[in-house]
Amino acid sequence: MVAAPCARRLARRSRSALVAALTVLLLQTLLVWNFTSLDAGEEQRGGAAGREKRDHGGDQRVHPQRRGPAAPYGKAMIEPPSPYTSLDTCDGYFSHRPKEKMRTDSNNENSVPKDFENIDNSNFAPRTQRQKRQPELVKKPLSKQKEHLRKKLEEEKMKKNLLLGKNSNEVVQFSDHLVKNSSSSNSNNNLKAIHRSSRHHHVKKKGNSSPELTYDQPPKCEVTGKEAISAMSRSKTKQCRQEIAEVYCQHKHGKLMPEKVTRFCKLEGKANNNVQWDEDSVEYMPANPVRIAFVLVVHGRASRQLQRMFKAIYHKDHFYYIHVDKRSNYLHRQVLQFASQYPNVRVTSWRMATIWGGASLLTTYLQAMRDLMEMNDWPWDFFINLSAADYPIRTNDQLVAFLSRYRDMNFLKSHGRDNARFIRKQGLDRLFLECDTHMWRLGDRRIPEGIAVDGGSDWFLLNRKFVEYVTFSNDDLVTKMKRFYSYTLLPAESFFHTVLENSPYCDTMVDNNLRITNWNRKLGCKCQYKHIVDWCGCSPNDFKPADFHRFQQTARPTFFARKFEAVVNQEIIGQLDYYLYGNYPSGTPGLRSYWENVYDEPDGVHTLSDVALTMYHAFSRLGLRRAEASFHAAGDNSCRYYPMGHPVSVHLYFLADRFQGFLIRHHATNLAVSKLETLETWVMPKKVFKVASPPSDFGRLQFSEIGTEWDAKERLFRNFGGLLGPTDEPVGMQKWGKGPNVTVTVIWVDPVNVIAATYDILIESSAEFTHYKPPLNLPLRPGVWTIKILHHWVQVAETKFLVTPLTFSNQQPIKQEEAMKYHSGPPKNAYMEQSFQGLNPVLNIPINAAHVDQAKRNAGLVGARLDAWVDSLVGSVWSAVDICSTGPTACPVMQGCAQTAWSSLSPDPKSELGPVKPDGRLR
């Protein structure tokens, strides 16, 4: 009877509310349309343009919507509403929810890349650099944002004097003559000689407004192109803006791109060479086998995976030239260490910061080719490029036998589509420039006349004759193509194809790069590189054990496969390794373990975030408390320690493809002898996902996790362990089993029971994963948060996650005013523009005044009291599993790290590199 008046009031309100809502919706639509038209480029092709904006980074950032839920079961006899029905309830509560149903992923795999009709690469409009939300800042209304952007664009157009600068990532720009370079000690100087000379610039600031841009050398034209203006508005440095304007003006004046190129191929169309694969060809090894130059272009920190791959491809008769990304100093140190053991392994004396799709990758290959051609003591016959994510699927002997049979051929994989379509989808008809480690799109351009443009995969095998031609030829084709592809997106996917197909060597082209790649269009094409390139690109997925049968196919010759990542799945690498070289002896340690470094002392603590540094220190103290609790005897201080300094190293630890936690190597003073010892602590996250008890009849939810760096392609968080601080933006992920369509409600509750966000998700029957990043105001209140998942307003599961307080700010001990800023939560507890406090009594989540007062006191803690608070929180969600000593120790019962099965110093024979065997191999 109580519900009837409420229902009548709802009915009366609904009519007027509907009219008001439609009016607001119309105004918002017109406003958004006007704002969007301002941002649009010169052309709109439809398709995925909207999807690009919604799905940036693999998650959906949406605006709050208002919906009132019915009371939970047992509170009133009202059926819970549909997630897509807007109701005004008697209690006045409104729920935040996504505008549209959550995006879900599936396992539809395709073994070869397809054309992506749903991907639109329309113009990127001017936009400002995305900034993290600050809690003290209030978002501007949309109309003000629109007006601000319009004024900014008008100012940019009116400014004839734009600040312009030099490329921060030094990329070789090809002229008619490439400078000579080799692996000699002068190579760094030679590389610098072919970079553009830098210029000096000045920036004047007026108050809080945007900096007034001045220059020493004004641009040679008025920059009016929308894409160029957009690129300059988004670029981070004045040097990059300078180069964008210079390139734009050269192109505008017709001085940048070649209009016509000479074709030297005598064939009509493309060569059609058919090569055969014979599994037993290794039995017929030629008298003069080819020798291969393996060029490894690597980055990141997966040194053990790289060493395992190197071990699998090594033979004393071949040559290995390794380029390590300029930003990967840890990996560079590891590579230098193992390369010094073998005379046929060298590391480039120059390093570049290559990016996905960047012109710098082509520069790297061309420079490596020049170096190899000038190494007179390396008589190689074939050039093969590999990364650390590759792995052989045939032996070296089989590869040599095959290439010896086709020693005059060049192996590249073509796109397999008509050229006009390929050019459009690849963006070859657009002008790009790499600077600020980003590929900026600057406008349209024409494909040169006289040649056939081709392209496909950027993994290839090229013979020495063609490499020499590409490196040293000054003919019209090579010279102009080097210039054309200096301003091209993904140039390595087209340059060698186009030059070969139009060169005197065109009859040597084989449409096969001898590789198999794990393409999965649905998962690999989520515009995941938009932060580094003005285009939507695709990337292959990692292989899993279920894919092993694909390596044994013999329909075409294949010798390598990609991609592999040991942090995603190491079992498949083990399967391949055993298939090629047989099992390791019984009892070999470490075969199912994998370690990957995330921090090394020579990198410096400035490379760590304050969150990571805070957590690593807490993990170290957690380990010392475990040592005292497990090893300490009454009256004996030999196993008691005091922490000293920053961590020495940090590793991720995996066992049987499951994340097992962090390994923290750290210094500590033994209190019994007052001497410094180096220890390693293994910390593991506690189970934080719980299903409702007693079991609910809702059984689709398998797992729920919170983290950052969600990888929608591999469906995992790259921030292993989920280390979160007050200024991070967490993503909620759920994994689902098969079942009927259901709607669930997700509720985010902060440490003092303030409901920060709530939204509904429609889970389709085929859905496997859902993920969503609620637009929470920062900073987040430190402490243990709870994610509650409800079905029909009955809780079915919950997940806990820690937002740790910071003990460091800019890698220095945090000061009290900084602690108050970061640890007090958002102003007025407003995580979003609307409040959800009306839900607290409905969901029986009371706000305890004592807990709120304690949180306020904790916000001002510094020093030892702050450490104690952090340790209590970390200890509630992490546990110290074990601790060991890396060297001599006064604790008599502590084991040495090399004698454990888990330490980063324990044996790892599968990745360790030893002496060359009598057969010339390492494996």
Image (tube, rainbow, N blue to C red):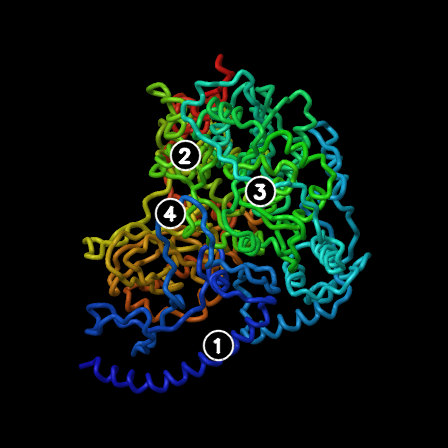
> Mark 2 = which residue?
682
Q: Residues within 10 Å of mark 1 (few under 14, many from 20)?
A: few
> Mark 1 = which residue?
29
Q: CA distance from mark 4 to mark 2?
A: 37 Å
Dot 1: element? helix
Q: CA distance from mark 3 to mark 2?
A: 22 Å
Tell me the kind of residue under disc 2: Trp
Q: CA distance from mark 1 to mark 3?
A: 44 Å
Q: Which residue: 53% across, 33% down?
A: 648
Q: Can you tell which mark lies on residue 607?
A: 3
Tell me if I can see residue 716 in this picture.
no
Front residue of 277/1: it is: 277
Tell me the kind of residue under disc 1: Thr
Choose the circle earlier in sequence order: 3 or 2: 3
Q: Which residue: 58% across, 45% down?
A: 269
Choose the circle earlier in sequence order: 1 or 3: 1
- Residue extending furthest toward the right: 216
Dot 3: element? helix
Choose the circle earlier in sequence order: 2 or 1: 1
